[in-house]
Image (cartoon, rainbow, N blue to C red):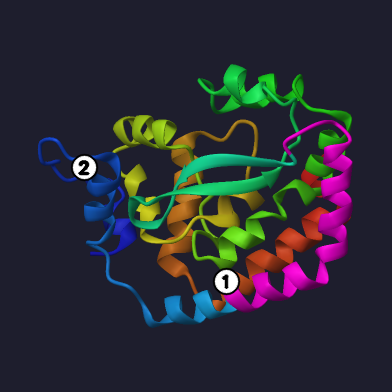
Amino acid sequence: MSVADRATAPAPVEPAHETLVERYARMAHTFERRPVDVILRALDVAIAGTALVVLAPVLGVCALAVLSTGRPVLYRGRRVGMAGRIFTMYKFRTLSADAETRLGPHYGAELTQLTAGEQTRVGRVLRATKLDELPQLWNVLTGDMSIVGPRPIRPTFFEDLSREIPAYWQRLVVRPGLTGFAQLRLSREMSWAEKLAHDFEFIADRSVRLYVSVIAQTAYYVVSGKWSS
């Protein structure tokens, strides 16, 4: 059954006492892998490895800039990855050091609004230029993420959204990404269900051509400043 066919199907019944990771892993494993997934993973490793070497000076400057606002330099957040595996996602810290304790219970538009008030001056620059995302290249290299895919989400929010939108768990059949369809097409009015539809579009149609196209569009948006507007 295709991803499109499954979009309206309810999530499978969960066995008693099953953990979050076990439940979503079982669901995601019902999807068959494709030959193109091996090629896309090879591209991930090549691009992330090269970028980490080439951008090492930029990473160093960013780290020093963040350090000037205090510690820690890196934000470490738990996210749900492919097949429900929980991993630690890295970003340059752009918020005040204890912002996570205040922002933790929020997500969506509310989180976006509250986050603006917690940003440091360095953080605003890093976010506007997307440089805060560069440490996730390490997540890509280690296999936790892909360059292109659905954005990773916190475990608690993922579970909530899976209850609200029965098909939401299907994002777990691929690695979460640095960028993706939903990010390129994102608008303030877009619902979680609409974002999910864009994620499903990539999952269903994923190919080398589409992967490269999303990366090219992302690079254009970042360089042109369209993403920060």
The residue at 72%/55% (across/down) is 134
Q: Residues within 10 Å of mark 2 (few under 14, many from 20)?
A: some
Q: In the image, what residue occupies the spot 48% across and 70% down? A: 206
Residue depicted at x 56% and y 57%: 177
Name above or below for residue 203 compared with residue 12: below
- 194 part of magenta stretch: no
Q: Residues within 10 Å of mark 1 (few under 14, many from 20)?
A: some
Name the spot of residue 59 as percent of width and height, x first. 81, 57
Q: Is 64 positioned to the left or the right of 130 in the image?
A: right
Q: Residue at x 39, y 82 (%)?
A: 35
Quadrant of the image occupied by residue 49: bottom right
Q: Is residue 166 visible?
A: yes
Q: Which residue is mark 2?
A: 10
Which one is earlier in the sequence, the residue at label 2 or at label 1?
Answer: 2
Which quadrant of the view contains residue 96? top right
Q: Amino acid at mark 2?
A: Pro
Write down the residue under mark 1: 210
Pick the quarter of the image with the C terminus.
Answer: top right
Report the side of 175 relative to 43 (left or right): left
Of 179 and 101, the residue lying toward us: 101
Between 50 and 202, the residue placed more toward the observer is 50
Q: Image quadrant of residue 155?
A: top left
Residue 185 visible at all: no
Local secondary structure at mark 2? loop
With respect to residue 118, does 82 lie above or below? Answer: below
Name the spot of residue 80 as percent of width and height, x first: 43, 46
* Numbered range of the magenta stretch: 44-72
Lateral position of residue 135 relative to residue 182, left or right? right
Q: Would you say the residues marked 2 and 1 are in contact, meaning their CB atoms lie under 8 Å apart?
A: no
The answer to whether 185 is drawn above or below residue 30 in the figure is above
**What SS does tag 1 mark?**
helix
Q: Main secondary structure of the magenta part?
A: helix
